[in-house]
Amino acid sequence: MALTTALPIYKTTYDLLTVVTPLTANMPRAHKATLGKRLAEESMDLVVLIYRANSARDKAPHLQQLLERMQVVELLLRLAMLGMTWTSAPVPAGHIMTPRDHVCGEFKDNDLTPGGGDEK
């Protein structure tokens, strides 16, 4: 069993959380209590389901639930994007980019330490 935090799906879901958190924080009050809260909770639940699937012997039920919840998050994000006039946070098109380089599904952590290079 691989360490959950080393899995690409975990890293991508964590990146999603880094986008969802400021997005929901900047929502107007009318949307924050409903759409924002649900979006944040569902996104966090994705991380939990990845952990459960990774540590379970029978991964299928967890993965099925993960796929269903991902569809809910996608719908909530689409609804949130309809109201993007209320936020000043730029949302780039395409992939979510963070301090990690994204290359066709593979992630390579950038070295963020002072004066450092890749240490392995």
Image (tube, rainbow, N blue to C red):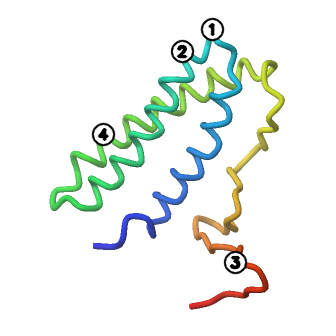
**Label 1 packing within 10 angstroms: few (<14), some (14-19), many (20+):** few
Q: Position of residue 98 (x, y in %)?
A: 69, 57
Quadrant where the N terminus sits is bottom left
Q: Position of residue 37 (x, y in %)?
A: 50, 23
Amino acid at pointer 3: Asp
Between disc 4 and disc 1, the foreground one is 1
Looking at the rendered structure, which numbered label has been put on residue 111? Answer: 3
Q: Residue at x 55, y 19 (%)?
A: 35
| Mark pair 1, 2: CA separation | 6 Å
Between disc 2 and disc 4, the foreground one is 2
Amino acid at pointer 2: Ala
Q: Is residue 12 left or right of residue 88?
A: left
| Mark pair 4, 3: CA separation | 34 Å
**Label 3 packing within 10 angstroms: few (<14), some (14-19), many (20+):** few
Q: Residue lying at the far left in this picture: please name it.
A: 57
Looking at the rendered structure, which numbered label has been put on residue 65? Answer: 4
| Mark pair 3, 1: CA separation | 40 Å
Looking at the rendered structure, which numbered label has been put on residue 30? Answer: 1
Confirm or deny contact between disc 1 and disc 2 (CB under 8 A): yes
Comes first in the chain, label 4 or label 1: 1
| Mark pair 3, 2: CA separation | 37 Å
Q: Position of residue 40 (x, y in %)?
A: 51, 32
Q: Is residue 98 left or right of residue 39?
A: right
Q: Residue at x 70, y 63 (%)?
A: 99
Comes first in the chain, label 3 or label 1: 1
Amino acid at pointer 1: Ala
Instruction: Report helix, strand or loop for mark 4.
Output: helix
Confirm or deny contact between disc 4 and disc 1 (CB under 8 A): no
- The residue that disc 2 covers is 33
Instruction: Report helix, strand or loop for mark 2.
Output: helix
Instruction: Report helix, strand or loop for mark 1.
Output: helix
Q: Nearer the viewer, residue 83 or 33?
A: 33
